Image (spheres, grey):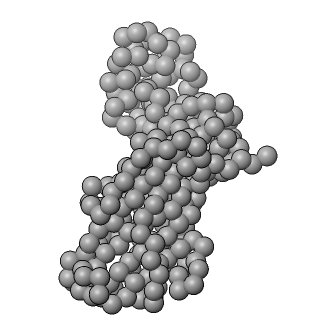
Amino acid sequence: MKKTTAIASVAGLLISAPAFAQSATASLTAPSSTVAAGSSITVTLEIDFSTGAAASGPFGLGLYGFGGDAVASGDAAGDTSASNAAVVPALPLGPVAQANAGLNIATIAGGRLLADGASPTSPQSVAQFDVNIDAGAMSGDTVTIDFDGAVVLALDSDLVTFATAPGANQQPLSTNSLTLTVGGGRLCADQNGDGMVTPADFNAWILNFNMGSLIADTNADGLVTPADFNAWILAFNAGANGPTCTP
């Protein structure tokens, strides 16, 4: 039975008026599509849009903002949560990143002014949050994250809202969902258990090796030996496509 849980909420400017751009897209991305049960992985919300030429208008300089929910569904979504929600520093208008209780566990808001003639780089990475995978998830279970919300642009004399469920005077907001699949074990190179393969795993491997922890057994021979260092390098270079280990 599929479970649905809202794991992040993004609240921003929601304004509608005549359209001046063709489309906007909200995408969710992660360093890997494979995760381990009980791990955490950072998800980034990106907004891609066409701004035309920013200019002064009835609202002063041009501006843009975003708002909505990141909603998780799938077999492993029941006890999946989110944490560490944040907007990027380049969004100084009303930046809010607050963890909440209940289904909408994070509230995020952001936007920024556009100087005359300016056009922001697109796509924009506007927010991030960590998805904490259900510790009881089984191999093959999935968590699909969708964005449900809106993007608003105000340029020259026009305002437009792109929304996933557009109302009157709103344009459709395209979305690209993200599906995370629980693997049969953790990635061998992931030594700190955060669901990702990063340089931080090198120091974590050293700590695990010095403790004699089988997590450092990267070649999976049941022993913790210096040979595991070369195995870790190979696994690290393979990234998300590297071998999996238990534990």
Which residue, as the protein is rendered here, is positioned at the far right?
A: 1
Camera-nearest residue between 154 and 220: 154
Q: Position of residue 48 (x, y in %)?
A: 42, 71
Total label count?
Answer: 0
Q: Please determine whether, in this image, residue 16 is positioned above or below residue 198.
A: below
Q: Position of residue 31 (x, y in %)?
A: 45, 47
Residue at image point 53% right, 82% down = 170
Q: Position of residue 188 (x, y in %)?
A: 49, 29
Q: Please determine whether, in this image, residue 225 is positioned above or below residue 93.
A: above
Residue at image point 79% right, 46% down = 1
Camera-nearest residue between 68 and 45: 68
Residue at image point 46% right, 33% down = 194
Camera-nearest residue between 171 and 205: 171
Q: Is residue 156 visible?
A: yes
Residue at image point 48% right, 66% down = 26
Image quarter of residue 42: top left
Q: Position of residue 95 (x, y in %)?
A: 33, 57
Q: Please determine whether, in this image, residue 91 is positioned above or below residue 113.
A: above
Q: Is residue 18 left or right of residue 33?
A: left
The C terminus - image quarter: top right
Q: Is residue 30 visible?
A: no
Image quarter of residue 114: bottom left
Q: Is residue 230 left or right of residue 101?
A: left
Q: Is residue 86 left or right of residue 222?
A: left
Image quarter of residue 177: bottom right
